[in-house]
Image: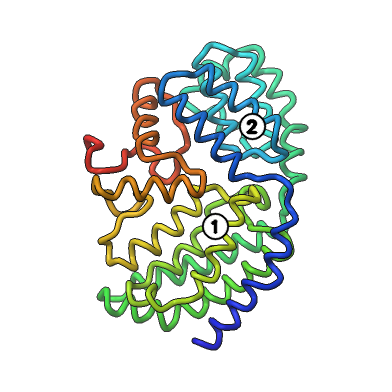
Amino acid sequence: MKSSCYIFLLMAFSPIHLVQAETPEDYLQYHLKISQAEELIAEGSFYGAIQVYEEVFKSYPFVFLRDYKNATQIAWHLGDETKALEFVRLGITGGWEMKQIKKHNFLNGLAETAGFKTVKKQYDSLRAVYLDRINSDLRWEVRKMSWRDQWMAIKGLLRFSEKSQAKWGEKRFAPKNEERLRRLLDIINQYGYPGEKLIGNEVWMMGIVSRRNQFSAEFNQSDTVYQGLKPILYTSISKGEMLPAIFASIDDWYITIKSSWQTGSYGFLAELKPEDIPRSNKLREKIGLRSVEVHNALIDVQNQTGMWFNMWPSGGKKIGVDSGE
């Protein structure tokens, strides 16, 4: 195991960084701007938030779908049908499916407008922009990798005790998972991180990497594989290939399991104590993720308006012991 980890680290820190240094756009600034828009939403400054969203949309060649969705809702909330439909069109080019738009409760009224009928006629051409962007062959490969990894995780859960689950995971699951993470490095080196921008899905590879950190506290304390991969994932945020929330979800598993559920970090898994929140906010700011306070304020706005801000993975739950839940 030690020799394989050594090889893994050599792969991690040589050719990949050469590829990652080539991108001209700084998407960490993108996410910080989106956090600014979210702060304005939390304060009820919806017009200001729309201005920030529009600035981001004009400044970056790739936009995450969640941001098109949120901007659409804000525009519709303000009664600006023209802007809402403009953002819907952009969202479709980013992968927003018509059936998802029609099922969106807050946008029911928008879907009944005459302007939306025009959008439906344009749907196929708008959808083609998205389909031309993603790598369909790689999408299928990552999906199959996810199925295999998830199936092994399920087999581990069928063990009778936590001890046997951890042992099976470390002896049987971890080597196979490491093979998939080696393939992830190959993909990053050739194409970039396989997330929303590249394959139109952010969950499949996130699950594979996250499971690396879920075996046991002892495993996380000694495993060098994730530690070698972590800076590469962080760089993927600045390249626009990974959402901050995806990185946070992966890293949250590592920190939480390593501490035997005693240390709260991003607040997705272990409940944050009041003294944990300043440290959590520093971690969040580093990757361009909204603060705990803004997250909780956005939950209040959701409850008051009926909007849904796609704050995966805890979009409907407040964070921290003072959340009132």
User: Which residue position is annotated with label 2?
Assistant: 56
Q: Are marks 1 and 2 in contact (CB under 8 Å)?
A: no
Left or right of 135 on screen, residue 10: left
Residue plotted at (55% across, 18% down): 75
User: Which residue position is annotated with label 1?
Assistant: 204
Residue 289 to residue 220: above or below:
above
> Where residue 58 sits in the image (x, y, percent)?
70, 29
Residue 138 to residue 86: above or below:
below
> Where residue 124 sits in the image (x, y, percent)?
74, 33
Tell me which numbered mark, 1 or 2, is placed earlier along the sequence.
2
In the picture, residue 229 is in which quadrant? bottom right
Left or right of 85 on screen, residue 207: left
- The Cα atoms of the two marked residues, 1 and 2, are separated by 27 Å
> Where residue 232 sits in the image (x, y, percent)?
59, 63
Q: Characterize the local packing of mark 2: few (<14), some (14-19) or many (20 or more) Cα atoms within 10 angstroms.
A: many
Identify the colour scheme used: rainbow
Q: What's the mark number on residue 30?
A: none
Secondary structure state at the residue bearing disc 1: helix
Residue 317 to residue 4: above or below:
above
The total number of labels drawn is 2
Amino acid at circle 1: Trp
Amino acid at circle 2: Val
